[in-house]
Amino acid sequence: MMTRPRALLAAVLAAATAVCLVVVSGGSSTSRASATEAIAVGRVHASYQPTHGKIFVLVIGTDAREGNPVNANGDAIHLLGFNTVTMRGGILNFPRDCWVNIPGHGTGKINSSLSRGGPRLMAKTIESLTGIRIGYWVMTGFHGFQGALAHLGHLKMRIPPGVNDVGFSGAQISAGVHRLPAYKVLQYARDRHDFPGGDLTRSHHQGDILLAMLRMLRNQVSGDPGRLMRWIAVTRRYTRTSLAPAELFRLGILASQVDPRRVRNVNVPVSLGSVGSADVDFIKQAPAHALYRRFKSHASL
Amino acid sequence: MNASAPVYKRLWVPFTIGAVLVAAAIGVGVWALMRGPVRTSPGSPVKPPAGSLPQARWRIAVYPAGALGKVPKHVKHEIAAARPHLARVVTDTFNALLLVPDRYRQEVSAYFDKPAAAALLRARLAPPAGAQAVQIRRARARIGVDAADPSRAAAAVDIIARAKRSGHRIAWHTHTVLWLERRHGRWSVMAFDVHQQPVRSHHGKHGGSGKHNGKHGGSG
């Protein structure tokens, strides 16, 4: 039978050994598994990108025909989220007529928050609505959007039902998969007359366009990583943004490693109504808050 | 018994503390190793060992990337000046990986940011197990340097290598994207994406047909 001190000593040594083993096995198990796989078949896939945490970027499309003035209405409003751990993401679309509280300005349509206080106020409005801290914003108008896309190439998109909106946006596109030039993408992004859902469907289509752009970025960069510099250059020339070039570079690397199939495009749930003579969208509180909570905690939808 | 009891009583406390300290030291050591390599300065260029098989020459193109108009002359000069540095990052890293494995860790630590180096070393990128007489058949890099700010670059590196294993010839393709930034006058890799896979054998010839255009090789 062991004496008490010997038993204690043995216990301490056993515990110390266990601690060491836990530290070693916990830190290297993933590497060991991948190493075994690599040795067996000679296949390795590994990647690293330097952005950490959950990233939220507000993308604003304004109704300005030229330049990027801050006194325009923000008619396309999309909150992009990326989770750098799960490498999933989400696009949360806010229809422009959502009736919301605009901090310091009472209530109003969400698109008017841009003309009242610029992209910062719009970001603040969405932050107070969703509880999500927005890291960056990017804003562009008609000319900027079309100019940027003209430099990046035709956008491959699937158009579910054909559109014919000659009198308004000018969109005339048959159903199917197309490689759209910049001006047609802008027309499609503006078209709301061809759909029963009107602006709500348009808002979802704008999210689809962002997803198609993410796919295009990924395809271009995988073939020639130097293409990312062009995306940065057009963002700097054609948009107004809070992102510094170095941050754009990092976000571009992140975007090039995110699989667009892991990014969901979702509209904020709304019901149609009116305030005075204005048609507005009322956000459905319960489902919307569940959506915000999920987006906030996972940065994906 | 009565005489030895006080000795144990005197010893077990320092012995326990000692054991805990040893365990803690081992734990800290392991943690430090897992955190990643310590950054070192690049040494001499990594070259194939003397007497090794003839290796394909590196073909490296460095170009201004992302320009929306004409590239100013001073940017062209800056990019030309960056060429040898960027070329060394690529050649040293991959020559070490394939030809001088003893220097691989050192080169990765020298040229990669700490977390990126740790991630690459964790991936255990290496020639297939048992590969002998490794020969680089094709080594190409296209490095785009940001024309708007030549302190950022992206490199696409494609290598086709072959070796002998158990009397058979094997070949594999490594496609790597490296994202680089110049800080304090030094280029370092901040992010990467690497794919390595076997290349299908074409009548015993590997990498000479021009069909391996950078992204995918067949399965072997």
Image: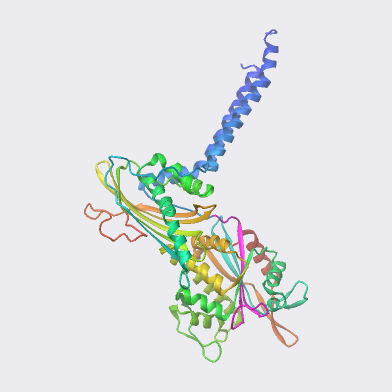
Please state the horizontal and vertical placement of residue B105, each as a whole percent of the image. 45, 42
* Residue A138 visible in the displayed image: yes
Please state the horizontal and vertical placement of residue A225, each as a whole percent of the image. 44, 62
Which residue is at the front of the view, A77 or B47?
B47
Please state the horizontal and vertical placement of residue B94, each as a whole percent of the image. 39, 49
- Above or below: residue A222 compared with residue A37: below
What residue is rendered at 61% in x and 77% in y?
A68
- Above or below: residue A124 compared with residue A14: below
Left or right position of B10 against A32: right
B9 falls in the magenta region: no
Name the residue furthest bottom: A167
A72 falls in the magenta region: yes
- Above or below: residue B81 compared with residue A32: below
How many numbered marks does the figure carry? 0
Q: Quadrant of the C terminus of chain A?
A: bottom right
Residue B164 appears in which quarter of the rendering? top left
- Specify the segment rendered in magenta: A50-77
Residue A196 appears in which quarter of the rendering? bottom right
Left or right position of A137 against B153: right
Which residue is at the front of the view, B173 or B89?
B89
What residue is rendered at 67% in x and 8% in y?
B1
* Residue B122 visible in the displayed image: no
Q: Quadrant of the N terminus of chain A?
A: top right
Please state the horizontal and vertical placement of residue A67, each as a whole percent of the image. 59, 79
